[in-house]
Amino acid sequence: MSQLNSLPPTTLVIGGARSGKSAYAERLVEDSGLKPVYLATATTGDDEMSERIRLHRERRGDLWSTVEEPLALATTIREHSNTGSAVLVDCLTLWLSNLMTLSRDIEQETQELAAMLPGLDGPVVFVTNEVGLGIVPANELARAFRDHAGRLNQAVAQASDHVVMMISGLPMTLKPNG
């Protein structure tokens, strides 16, 4: 079977910080043979984040088209999903942070995102952080973020065809394709 036919309709790549999530997800999309579309949810809030974004762009090169959308994720995925392209969303936890900053309805946004996944015309690969494996955060905002991220990740994992957890650069399949 060719790699072009092996990219599932929806893939979730989850892991901790610096686990290799983004690079692995990028390889999945590039290996598909489809036109790669990078849907970036990050915003350049400071110099350090600007440098992270620059390094991600440099790693991807000119092959990718980039769409920056920090909030309207479901709508933007629908707009760019087609049979000739594969969309990479990097990342769900930054999107969540953007929503929380603006006091958006996280449950509604999560439900809308998960509900539209089965109807997409082309494959989508999500990158997200696993933030629930550490200690209980000391403040209310951090606990709320951890809880929202856990529920968001569960909803997208449930709606996804394939789920991979990255640990130390190694992919571990949690939910096989099909």
Image (tube, rainbow, N blue to C red):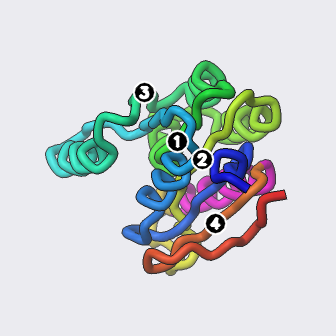
- Whole-Å distance between the Cαs marked 2 and 3? 14 Å
- Whole-Å distance between the Cαs marked 1 and 4? 15 Å
Residue lying farthest to the left in this orientation: 47
* Number of other residues with Cα within 10 Å of mark 3, as a class: few under 14, some 14 to 19, many 20 or more: some
- Whole-Å distance between the Cαs marked 2 and 4? 11 Å
Where does the image place residue 6, in percent across and percent down from the top left?
70, 52
Range drawn in magenta: 143-159
Q: On the rendered image, what quadrant is the N terminus found in? A: bottom right
Give the residue at mark 3. Answer: 67
Upstream in sequence: badge 4 or badge 3: 3
- Whole-Å distance between the Cαs marked 3 and 1? 10 Å
- Whole-Å distance between the Cαs marked 4 and 3? 24 Å
Residue shown at the point (75%, 40%) measured from the top left:
114
For numbered disc 1, what is the local secondary structure?
A: strand
Which image quadrant is residue 119 in? top right
For numbered disc 2, what is the local secondary structure?
A: strand
Q: Main secondary structure of the magenta part?
A: helix
Upstream in sequence: badge 1 or badge 4: 1
Upstream in sequence: badge 3 or badge 1: 3
Where does the image place residue 2, in percent across and percent down from the top left?
67, 52
Residue shown at the point (46%, 51%) measured from the top left:
26
CB of mark 2 within 8 Å of CB of mark 1? yes
Q: On the rendered image, what quadrant is the C terminus found in? A: bottom right
